[in-house]
Image (cartoon, rainbow, N blue to C red):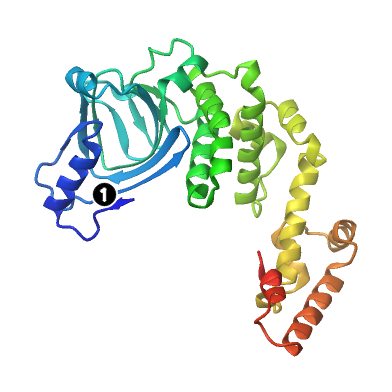
């Protein structure tokens, strides 16, 4: 990790130019800007590297002379999280904005500019990605709209991978390479090859499940709304959730698990059962109790009473210093 939080702006600029200078010649677009700071993280997953940059507006150049000197033959897929990045002499359609994907071929010359920006970058040796691409040499500085379903899927996958990177094992890091490459190729090709469909489908299901998790309190988790967000048909959506008992069953079970977690949470003892149920869309008491009993083999009231009884036993047997207490507190 590189962070210039404790450096003077001039020192921060020097450190940034020295580090990114392995790949590009960089210049600040506002020369002498005394607010320059940057933060960069990098995680190595076997033969691919995932990096994150946060920096102010600047220019990036990769000349033919530099390409000849360093001999790098990699492709970087940059997801713009904030700001914009694109060709300095290009039109608006050649600039990636928040959510978009821009492809940088390090074996080809580049001359780009950014606003203040945050980005997530996947750098891959050409030999790994090119065999999966159509016309692999024709994507340099190509911008792919973030609204495209496969781009959104790749973006979600990379964000999730970045968030998990610090805790992932070497074995898992190596296992994730192939699915990541296949998903990246699908986004660039704007299509899914039959042999890559399994990996893309797994990523799609994971992304939909994350969407449901983030919006579990919302009332617009209809099949139509979800299918529209991810650019798939209702038939495809229903097919993906068949192993989970169907989409509606999956959402209901997720909501019931959230209700259960709140019922056994000592910090929510003051909340009524009906209020908790209503928050997760269970407006009819009898239907909620019936669904809850079907999932957990007891009523919500019984669940809350047993949880309170269990906490009392823990206190009697030595307070909060046992591993059993820690296990109970897991969320």
Foreground residue, 213 or 181?
A: 181
Foreground residue, 236 or 21?
A: 21
Residue 25, how many percent across, how many down? Answer: 18, 31
Residue 298, how many percent across, how many down? Answer: 89, 66
Q: Residue at x 22, y 18 (%)?
A: 68
Against 15, residue 177 (above or below) is above
Residue 237, how many percent across, how many down? Answer: 71, 31
Of all residues, the one furthest to the left in this rendering is 32
Q: Residue at x 44, y 33 (%)?
A: 48
Q: Residue at x 71, y 58 (%)?
A: 280
Q: Is residue 253 visible?
A: yes
Specify whether 245 is left or right of 118. Answer: right
Q: Is residue 34 visible?
A: no
Specify whether 280 is left or right of 175. Answer: right
Q: Quadrant of residue 321?
A: bottom right
Residue 217, how many percent across, how many down? Answer: 65, 55
Against 163, residue 140 (above or below) is above
**Picture quarter with the C terminus:** bottom right
Against 141, residue 40 (above or below) is below
Q: Which residue is mark 1?
A: 38
Q: Residue at x 74, y 83 (%)?
A: 314
């Amino acid at each position: 990790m590189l962070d210039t939080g404790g450096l003077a702006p001039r020192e921060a600029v020097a450190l940034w130019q020295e580090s990114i200078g392995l790949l590009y010649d960089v210049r600040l677009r506002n020369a002498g800007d005394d607010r320059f700071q940057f933060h960069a993280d990098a995680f190595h997953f076997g033969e691919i590297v995932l990096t994150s940059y946060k920096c102010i507006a600047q220019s990036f150049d990769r000349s033919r002379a530099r390409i000849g000197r360093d001999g790098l033959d990699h492709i970087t897929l940059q997801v713009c999280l904030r700001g914009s990045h694109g060709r300095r002499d290009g039109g608006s359609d050649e600039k990636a904005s928040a959510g978009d994907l821009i492809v940088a071929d390090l074996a080809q010359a580049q001359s780009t500019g950014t606003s203040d920006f945050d980005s997530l970058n996947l750098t891959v040796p050409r030999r790994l990605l090119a065999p999966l691409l159509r016309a692999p040499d024709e994507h340099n500085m190509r911008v792919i709209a973030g609204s495209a379903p496969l781009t959104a899927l790749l973006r979600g996958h990379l964000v999730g991978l970045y968030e998990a990177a610090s805790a992932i094992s070497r074995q898992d890091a190596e296992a994730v390479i192939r699915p990541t490459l296949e998903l990246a190729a699908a986004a660039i090709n704007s299509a899914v090859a039959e042999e890559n469909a399994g990996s893309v489908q797994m990523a799609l299901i994971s992304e939909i499940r994350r969407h449901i998790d983030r919006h579990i309190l919302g009332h617009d988790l209809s099949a139509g709304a979800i299918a529209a967000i991810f650019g798939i048909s209702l038939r495809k959506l229903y097919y993906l959730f068949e192993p989970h008992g169907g989409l509606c069953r999956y959402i209901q079970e997720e909501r019931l698990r959230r209700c259960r977690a709140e019922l056994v949470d000592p910090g929510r003892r003051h909340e009524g059962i009906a209020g908790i149920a209503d928050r997760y869309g269970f407006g009819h008491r009898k239907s909620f109790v019936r669904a809850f009993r079907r999932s957990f083999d007891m009523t919500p009231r019984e669940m809350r009473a047993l949880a309170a009884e269990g906490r009392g036993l823990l206190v009697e047997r030595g307070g909060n210093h046992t591993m059993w207490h820690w296990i109970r507190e897991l969320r």
